[in-house]
Image (cartoon, rainbow, N blue to C red):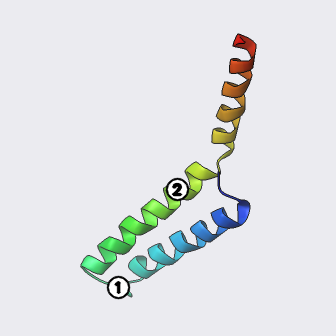
Amino acid sequence: MLTRDGVIARFILWFCFYFLSGTGMVEGGAATICGVLGTVALTSALLHYSPLVEFLTIRTEKMRQEEN
């Protein structure tokens, strides 16, 4: 899991990449790369600090403890 600051940094990075390609500051292949990198930054931020992931982790730990 990432810390809260790490997640905020990834959201800022995601916004910057999408802002560059969405406003037309970069075009062509560079805009495609910005879009792909923005998607990667967003998904990694969501997957590394998601309440759903935390809930599933806690749930699996409880299930393992009940089995033992």
Q: Nearer the viewer, residue 9 or 28?
A: 9
> Which of pointers 2 and 1 indicates the residue nearer the eye?
2
**Residue at screen point 57% across, 58% down:** 45
| Left or right placement of residue 20 versus residue 32 in this view | right
Q: Nearer the viewer, residue 12 or 67?
A: 67
Task: Write down the residue under mark 2.
Answer: 44
Which comes sooner in the sequence, label 2 or label 1? 1
In the orientation shown, which residue stands out farthest toward the bottom? 25
Q: Secondary structure at mark 1?
A: loop
Name which residue type carries label 2.
Ser
Q: Residues within 10 Å of mark 1 (few under 14, many from 20)?
A: some
The percent coordinates of residue 53 (x first, y second) are 63, 40
Task: Write down the residue under mark 1.
Answer: 26
Q: Residues within 10 Å of mark 2 (few under 14, many from 20)?
A: some
Q: Which mark is residue 68?
A: none
Name which residue type carries label 1.
Val
Q: CA distance from mark 2 to mark 1?
A: 23 Å
**Residue at screen point 74% across, 23% down:** 62
Label tally: 2
| Residue 8 drawn above or below residue 55 | below
| Left or right placement of residue 5 versus residue 26 in this view | right
**Residue at screen point 44% across, 60% down:** 40
Q: In which quadrant of the rendered view does residue 7 lie?
A: bottom right
| Left or right placement of residue 56 versus residue 17 in this view | right
The percent coordinates of residue 6 (x first, y second) are 65, 65
| Residue 65 drawn above or below residue 21 | above
